[in-house]
Image: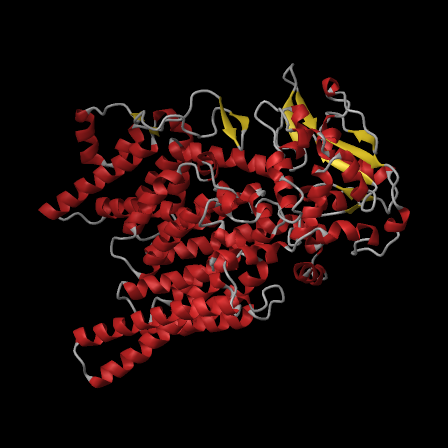
Amino acid sequence: VFILRFLQWLEQFSPLFKTSLNDVCVYMPAYFGAISTIFTFLLAQEASGSGWVGVTAAAIMAIIPAHLMRSVAGGFDNESVAVAAMVCTFYLWVRALRTDRSAVPFGILSGLSYVYMVAAWGGYVFVLNMVGLHAAVLVILGRHSTHLHRAYSLFYVIGTAGALQIPVVGWNPLQSMEQLGPMAVFFGLQLIEVTSVLLQRSRANFVVRWGLLYALLAVLIGAGYFATIWLLESGLIWEFSTRVKSLFIKHTKTGNPLVDSVAEHQHTPTSVYFSYLHHTYYIGPVGCLMCLWRPTEAKYFLIVYCITSAYFASRMIRLVLLSAPAIAAASAMFIALPVEWACIQLWKPKVLSLSGVLRRSLAMLVLIFLVGCNYVKLPMQKKGHLVKYKGFPIEIPTGTGVPYKTNTGFKFRIPKPDWGQALELWQTAPYKLIEGGLKAKAKPYAELQAHCDQLATTFKDPNLKGLLRHCGKVVAAFVAGGRVTKFRRHCNSLAEGLSEPQIIARGRSATGEEVIIDDYREAYWWLRDHTHPDARVLAWWDYGYQITGIGNRTSIADGNTWNHEHIALLGRCLVSSEKKGHAIIRHLADYVLVWTTRFMGMYGDDLAKSPHMARISGSVYPDIDASAFWIDQYEMASPMMQESVLYRLHHYRLSPELNIKLKYFEEAYTTKHHMVRIYKVKDVDQKSKNYPKRRYPPALKKTLAMAKDFSEVKRIERLKAGKFD
């Protein structure tokens, strides 16, 4: 809204700024994606000290699919705004550690940026712990300094004070277990600073000074451990949330079946890395190791960021997003630093000395190696093959970049060089050897080379002009073909897929013609056009926002999963028998909507999600036996599932061999491709329908009395087991 108001103010000066709230929401992810790219450039430049690395990191960040998944126009979400705030906070933090003079101003700015991050997304916990972990690592490595103490103190005090003002956050920064680590680092830095000042005044030697310091830290850690146990038992601080625990234990054992049911919360399959990171998945770790050469505070941060984000990305699919800035900066280190060093060695004023010859020879080998890596044929799959994801077969087509063999070795496309020609090229200009391997890419290489030459002519300094021209030729060699071209094409292809609507599918008919599958909107439009405006629709919570936004009808549950007990009641309605389920549904809804996409070969429908529905319902209602509700790989359902409302509504009329006859529901509409089905609830209780909204009708009092508070149930279980995790 602020952006809209600002653009409306600018509209009085120029009609170019005329816009609507919808336009702002659509383009906001792209705008903030550009901001994220700028701060990635600054972060990579700060870590490497090289503008070349910053530009390369920005180029990768701008197109890498791990970033595009939340920065494509139309993908309006919290993460779209939060990534920019996260990278901004990281840059300002490492910038604050450069000198003593920069600690105070940039420490204040990093704290303010962190407050914005807190207001934008719940992932602010990752940002807080990343900064705290980096500060702790610097202390452990003996790189404690006054500017570290000042920068972190300002960051933590300003950030925590601002976070406490966010209503949704409340007292979490002071009472939540996942945020107590950075607090411990804050108090530890205060202790170290005070102790250092006192020891310096006492004129103690180095060994005594640091021995006493580490002894005090050990006492502080021990006291903090016992204090945490006591505070947990007394209830003054809260244990790790279920979502945080799912990052450190197997996702099927978090203790919360609602969290376990979300696909984005599950472990990341290997194919996701190749889809969203592609070639940076290989070169990023190498660039991370290169940060160990002449390390600085910023380089240590990049190492910690890479390792931490890689771990969390492996634990949860949606957290691959967090690794995008890290992998972009690390990959840029691998690509740009060697090229920059080699170009400087080759084209700086020549000095006849043994060291000069060795440096130029090594630079030549580095360039040949990098260009060779660019044209290595990686062991990619040759044809589409079937894999199983979450128990269902999925065909991965050729060209997705998913390796099907990891031990096939590497095959170079560059022909063996002619050593006579190589000697001649050595005497003229080393970069021509690179040109010799690019005959197949002559046209794009020539175009890029022309642009570089045109740019170089603007400089009057002959040395700078020559360096830019030769370096530009090397960059052109990289961009013109090989792995770089494949990476760009892959990113462009995935960007097109990410930009397509999520509720509209594209397919091919038997004759090869393109077919648009629009069943979801078709169902929502039917609700909008053929039901009463006050109609209530019962569907699984995944589709609540779509029913409300597109169908303009009231949904019993939306995408907000904070109310575990309400989602459990919804699951009870769907997994119970038709008679028992209808006894509850008639007091809640007028229509029931189910996804039946398996009739089109897509197996992620409501029937696939139904075991999760049973587990969520069983976590609150003891009479629901989730272990008796299952379906095997041959689609043979258990007796309990066959009698359930969901199973009967799913297969009614479309599976005649089951001979299902409905008594309490009436088919109202089935979409063209049988992907969505809508049923009218018979004998709706009008008294319950007229009951005030946002409250359960009295008729459900008996059912609700059977429910147990899920958080209280889990707390009692842990107390009985003596666990405080």
**Residue 49, above or below 518:** below
State the image quarter where residue 644 is shown. top right
Answer left or right for 535 relative to 84: right
Can the viewer see residue 176 in this picture? yes
Which is more toward the observer, 672 or 461?
672
The location of residue 516, given as percent across then percent down, is 69, 27
**Residue 294, above or below 269:** below
The location of residue 172, given as percent across then percent down, is 54, 66
Answer left or right for 591 relative to 273: right
Question: Farthest left residue?
Answer: 354
- Residue at 83% over, 46% down: 587
Which is more toward the observer, 484 or 281?
281
State the image quarter where residue 659 is shown. top right
Specify the quadrant that holds the N terminus: bottom right
- Residue at 29% over, 60% down: 296
The location of residue 709, given as percent across then percent down, is 65, 56
Which is more toward the observer, 567 or 191?
567
Which is more toward the observer, 257 or 139?
257
Q: How many marks?
A: 0
